[in-house]
Amino acid sequence: MNTFLISYDLGLPKTISDYHILTEYIKSFVYWAKPLQSVWLIKTDKSAAQVRDEIKIRIDSNDKVLVMDVTGTSWATYNVSQKVTDWVKNNL
């Protein structure tokens, strides 16, 4: 399985519905963590392009998204919850 970092900027107008649709998709993965406001980590057998394409159908054309493979990379955090730090420790 690969671990991907997902980050996004939702363009205007931003609505609660926009965030809800995107976050529900991300939370549909068995393994996920949310270390920052618009940053998620997921673990999946899908490719980065597959995840990107599945996100694209859930967002508007003026939104931006980054899906990056972070499997096995080194990392460090500051002021991030212990729950997320533990998730990263166990999933990268």
Image: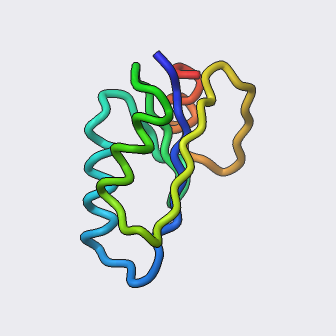
Question: On the rendered image, what quadrant is the C terminus found in?
Answer: top right
Q: Residue at x 50, y 29 (%)?
A: 87
Point out the residue furthest to the top here. Answer: 1
79 vs 12, nearest the viewer? 12
Query: Would you identify the image quadrant in which residue 68 lies?
Result: top right
* Mark count: 0
- 31 sits left or right of 79 in the view: left
**Residue 82 on image: x %, y %:** 55, 38
Please state if 75 lies on the left or on the right of 15 as rendered: right
Front one among 56 and 30: 56
The residue depicted at 26 percent of the width and 50 percent of the height is: 24
* Viewer-closest of 34 and 78: 34
Where residue 73 sits: x, y (%)?
71, 25
Residue in the picture at 47% in, 67% down: 63
Q: Is residue 83 left or right of residue 68?
A: left
Left or right position of 34 against 57: right
Q: How is the image coloured?
A: rainbow
Q: Which of the 4 quarters of the picture holds residue 43?
A: top left
Give coordinates of residue 23: x percent, y percent.
33, 53
11 to 78, vertically: above or below: below
Residue at image location 38% in from the left, 78% down from the top: 14
Residue 41 coordinates in the image, percent (x, y): 49, 38
